[in-house]
Image (cartoon, rainbow, N blue to C red):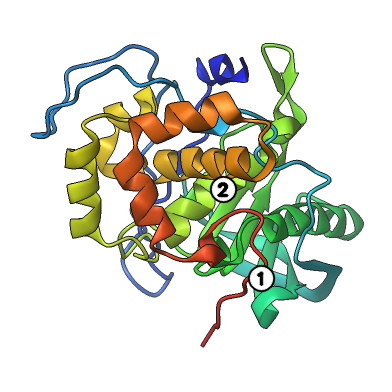
């Protein structure tokens, strides 16, 4: 199964809180490392079983696919060259960088998202990359785009990230391979994970859509983690990892193609599934319900 691809690969990296240039220096991102072996937990909640997956981004490339519909209208508007503060993993820091700025529009909820493409790309190539990733953003549930205000796009073969109202993309990551499997197969699943950081994680880094008390209760009731990565980084990764599994669970119910995976997920995290379902249909893949944006 493609879940084995998660070994040695880590895309689930959360951005630290973004501070504007006029304030103190931005807090560096917390780098994560691949977690392939179980380690003793620091959590007070007793866990019953070893996680079934190494990382949920790689459960299946069929949770969402390139042929799935997108709310992206297909057009981005060029707004010129700007200097903006973005995170760049090549510097492992927030940087003030020259970028091509685009505005992308999405039909559901009439949502607009700013796309910042590093000036290392030509204007023409920057537009191609902006459209490429805007379409993927439009494929994830509209509720999960709720707190995504910007996409930050750079060159380089480095992992994606989420938080601070943004999703970070290094294009080379998705142009490469792992275990001879194209990483492009997992763009949509990666966006689901990173959008979970941006929309569901607690403030200030995330949008705080998941109630923390309800989540703690769900973790205790489930008594297990869905992935080794979630278990080893429970404070920062459990929500995003669990949401990736939830999306696969919904896909299994919707298409029947991931029936075995859906059963494993339901048996491992039934209470977490209830928390995600309580957010409403706008947070589930395949939904046609648009949230009302203020």
Viewport quadrant of the N terminus: top right
Q: Tell me the residue that label 1 is attached to.
A: 114
Q: Position of residue 193 (x, y in %)?
A: 51, 45
Secondary structure of residue under mark 1: strand
Marks 2, 1: nearer the viewer: 2
Q: Is residue 118 visible?
A: no
Q: Residue at x 52, y 32 (%)?
A: 262
Closer to the chain start, of discs 2 and 1, is 1
Q: Position of residue 93 (x, y in %)?
A: 45, 47
Q: Are marks 2 and 1 in contact (CB under 8 Å)?
A: no
Label disc, if present, on residue 192 of the rendered structure: 2
Count residues near mark 1 (Cα–Cα under 10 Å), then give few for <14, some for 14-19, many for 20+. many
Q: Residue at x 30, y 45 (%)?
A: 271
Secondary structure of residue under mark 2: helix
Q: Residue furthest left?
A: 44
Q: Quadrant of residue 231?
A: top left
* Image vertical order of residue 196 relative to residue 248, above or below: below
Q: Residue furthest bottom?
A: 294
Q: Position of residue 150 (x, y in %)?
A: 60, 65
Q: Left of 153 or right of it: where is 32?
A: left
């Amino acid at each position: 199964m493609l879940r084995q691809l998660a070994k040695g690969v880590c895309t689930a990296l959360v951005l630290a809180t973004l501070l504007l240039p006029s304030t103190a220096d931005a807090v560096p991102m917390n780098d994560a490392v691949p977690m392939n072996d179980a380690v003793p937990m620091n959590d007070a909640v007793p866990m019953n079983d070893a996680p079934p997956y190494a990382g949920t981004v790689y459960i299946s490339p069929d949770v969402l696919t390139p042929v799935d519909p997108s709310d992206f209208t297909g057009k981005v508007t060029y707004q010129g060259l700007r200097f903006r503060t973005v995170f760049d993993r090549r510097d492992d820091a927030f940087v003030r960088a020259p970028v091509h700025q685009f505005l992308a529009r999405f039909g559901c909820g009439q949502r607009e998202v700013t796309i910042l493409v590093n000036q290392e790309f030509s204007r023409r190539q920057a537009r191609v990359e902006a459209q490429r990733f805007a379409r993927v953003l439009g494929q994830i549930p509209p509720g999960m785009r709720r707190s995504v205000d910007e996409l930050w796009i750079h060159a380089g073969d480095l992992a994606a990230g989420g938080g601070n109202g943004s999703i970070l993309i290094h294009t080379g990551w998705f142009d490469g391979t792992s275990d001879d499997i194209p990483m492009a197969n997992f763009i949509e699943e990666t966006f689901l994970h990173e959008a979970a950081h941006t929309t569901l994680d607690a403030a200030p880094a995330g949008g705080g859509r998941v109630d923390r008390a309800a989540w703690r209760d769900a973790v205790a009731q489930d008594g297990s983690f869905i992935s080794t990565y979630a278990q080893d980084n429970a404070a920062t990764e459990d929500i995003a990892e669990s949401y990736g599994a939830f999306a696969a669970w919904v896909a299994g119910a919707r298409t029947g193609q991931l029936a075995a995976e859906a059963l494993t997920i339901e048996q491992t995290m039934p209470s977490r599934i209830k928390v995600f379902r309580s957010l409403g249909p706008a947070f589930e893949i395949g939904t046609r319900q648009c949230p009302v944006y203020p």
